[in-house]
Image: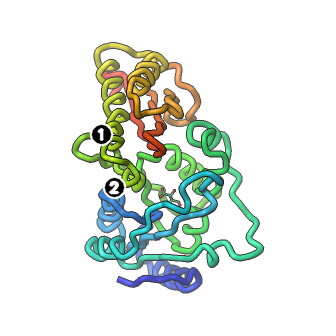
Amino acid sequence: MRTIHNPRELQELALSVRGSGTSIGLVPTMGALHEGHLSLIRRARQSDEFVIVSIFVNPTQFGPNEDLDRYPRTLERDLDACRECGVDVVFVPSAADLYPEGFQTYVEVGPLASRLCGASRPGHFRGVATICLKLFNLCQPNRAYFGLKDYQQYRVVERMARDFDLPLEIVPMPIVREPDGLAMSSRNSYLSPEERAAATVLFRSLEDAARACEAGERDPQTLAARVRRSIEADPLARVDYVEAVDPLTLEPAASLPALIAVAVFVGNTRLIDNRLLEAPDSS
Ligand code: PAF
């Protein structure tokens, strides 16, 4: 496994690998790798001949009062995990290399990016789309893998790939959960033991909505209200948003299928999760 810091060196290598007809799989990450990331890497290892993992805590997707400075950085452990998964190249660029002085061009994201996390975190998806486009240009992937915990991110990046005619496939991958249902996230490490226990309320309330749906409740807004009520009942949880949206447009859903998407502060830590609800007979 090679670790490459220099973007030009990585791009030269990627161009020659892709030019030789070898397929490249990219797993873009901000490090602090967990089983969710590893599931993407293993899938890339199965589908692609050459696997690149990028590790870069991207400053342009963090707001001024967010956790850029304290975001967990565990590079040595991440490199070990990548080695064990058979990764070919780990790309670890610096912010100065990716955003040198004079940098001024950003992807302008559309309505998909304006709701949900886009409303709570202005500029977030502009930063995500911009870094993803840069990583795609540097790594030349045939496929790039994204976890569905960040459902909106997947939709925004997939839309950008289509709108900009990027020659790659954006591959969505299922949410990986802890045994008690909490969606894996690098930010889970911020939680105190009490908060960690309370954090399962996201999963529990989404499961409860799925059961209500199976039992016959088909109105997405009623189901979302039910999720909101059960999260609000937890003293350690504060709802940022709970919304039932159309899975394609992310506009409020009037009927199933609907994605129930939640963002919740547990203590100071903002967690997200989601669940797709379909009418049982529509599957
Ligand atoms: O999901 C993430 O970790 C980040 O948003 C990504 C896709 C690596 C871009 O910085």
Which residue occupies the foreground of this view, 212 or 167? 212
Q: Nearer the viewer, mark 1 or mark 2?
A: 1
Locate residue 134 relative to residue 187 in the image: left or right. Answer: right
Q: Determine the secondary structure under disc 2.
A: helix
Quarter occupied by the N terminus: bottom left
Locate residue 173 relative to residue 221 in the image: left or right. Answer: left
Locate residue 96 relative to residue 206 in the image: left or right. Answer: right
Which residue occupies the foreground of this view, 155 or 120? 120
Image x and y of residue 227, in percent: 41, 24
Which residue occupies the foreground of this view, 16 or 147? 147
Which residue occupies the foreground of this view, 230 or 145? 230
Quarter occupied by the C terminus: top left
Note whether 183 is above or below 25 in the view shown: above
Question: Which residue is denoted by mark 2 in the rendering?
Answer: 36
Note whether 210 is above or below 171 in the view shown: above
- The residue depicted at 33 percent of the width and 25 percent of the height is 210
Q: Residue furthest left?
A: 179
- The residue depicted at 49 percent of the width and 34 percent of the height is 247
